[in-house]
Image (spheres, rainbow, N blue to C red):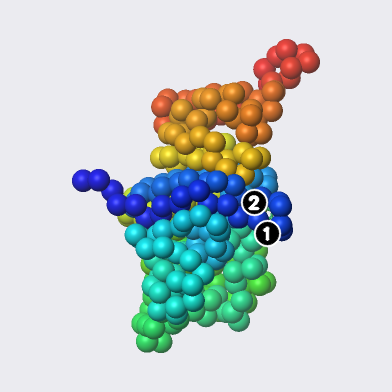
Amino acid sequence: MAKSAVFELNDISYAYLPGQAALSGVNLSVAAGERLVLLGPNGCGKSTLQKVLAGLIFPAGRVAAFGQDITAAAMSDKKFAAAFRRKVGFVFQNSDVQIFCASVRDEIMFGPLAMGLPPDDARQRAEETMAFVGIGALADRLPHHLSGGEKKKVAVAAVLAVNPDVLILDEPTNGLDPRTQRWMLEALAGLAAAGKTVITATHHLDIVGELAERVAVMDETHTIVATGRPADILRDRELLLAANLIDERYHVHLHGDDGHVHIHRHEAARGRHP
Ligand SMILES: Nc1ncnc2c1ncn2[C@@H]1O[C@H](COP(=O)(O)OP(=O)(O)O)[C@@H](O)[C@H]1O
Ligand SMILES: [Mg+2]
């Protein structure tokens, strides 16, 4: 059975400031249940594209989600916007812009309450989600006083509590310690296995194989310049060089065909491998 499209983007462009493109002529289709990575160097437009997908900004061109056009006018309808936000959850790169409640429990109950669950049910949903994410012990803490990794888990839990079909995560492993990074990668794999559509943005090649079944490469022209399976994208040294994802001294070594990579920096001057 053909998978239905969650998102269809046709020739979208966006500029925060006149004459300075953040996105330029992007075409993208995302299938239900797909694990897609937006891969590109700093400033290429990954976060901007994710904000478009999350219905937070409205570019020129056509954006459709679940077969309906997503426009500022459509989203000004409260019912339409609420239905969209139940289906599409966005985890910001910076957790501080996402968390605002006086306790972790309140933070995670916020979404369920906003979608109209009775308080007891919202609380139950929050307890389950905190247990799933492993932050039950933090329930009464002030979110802003938590560590970066703990804040990230709170932000993820706040999104998961609404049980959206689509999860969009901006640089989800950035700034996390190795164990929390591993937790994040496994949590996202588990959510994808449960049928969620998972769209992540990153510039880290070493996590692409684990995060993606399809990669969309963006470059400094602010558009998608290639899409493909992780193994094929990661093997394309010319593409990665041109997109500023590696420099001349990096070599990507693929292990097997699943996009699992080791990235080595060669000591070019001395001509030896580290
Ligand atoms: N709030 C903003 N105001 C003005 N320019 C912005 C803003 N956010 C991003 N930009 C610009 O838009 C372009 C794309 O940025 P962004 O989507 O954040 O890229 P990425 O996430 O790939 O690093 C960059 O040139 C960046 O400077
Ligand atoms: Mg970004």
Badge 1 amino acid: Tyr
Q: Is mark 1 within 8 Å of ligand 1?
A: yes
In the rendering, which numbered label is found on residue 22? Answer: 2
Classify 10 Å Cα crowding around label 2: few (below 14), some (14-19), many (20 and above): many
- At x 50% / y 48%, what residue is drawn? 11
Q: Is mark 2 within 8 Å of ligand 1?
A: yes
Is the Cβ of the residue at disc 1 closer than 8 Å to that at disc 2?
yes
The image shows residue 225, relative to residue 120, as above or below, that is: above
**Which quadrant of the view contains residue 161?**
bottom left
Residue at the outermost right position: 269
157 or 243, which lies in front? 243
- At x 51% / y 69%, what residue is drawn? 72
87 or 70, which lies in front? 70
Badge 2 amino acid: Ala
- At x 70% / y 14%, what residue is drawn? 272
Q: Position of residue 116 (x, y in %)?
A: 39, 83
Classify 10 Å Cα crowding around label 1: few (below 14), some (14-19), many (20 and above): few
The image shows residue 7, relative to residue 103, as above or below, that is: above
**Which quadrant of the view contains residue 112?**
bottom left
62 or 78, which lies in front? 62
Tell me the distance, in whole angstroms, between the alpha carbons under discs 1 and 2: 7 Å
Q: Secondary structure at mark 2?
A: strand
In the rendering, which numbered label is found on residue 16? Answer: 1
- Earlier along the polypeptide chain: callout 1 or callout 2? 1
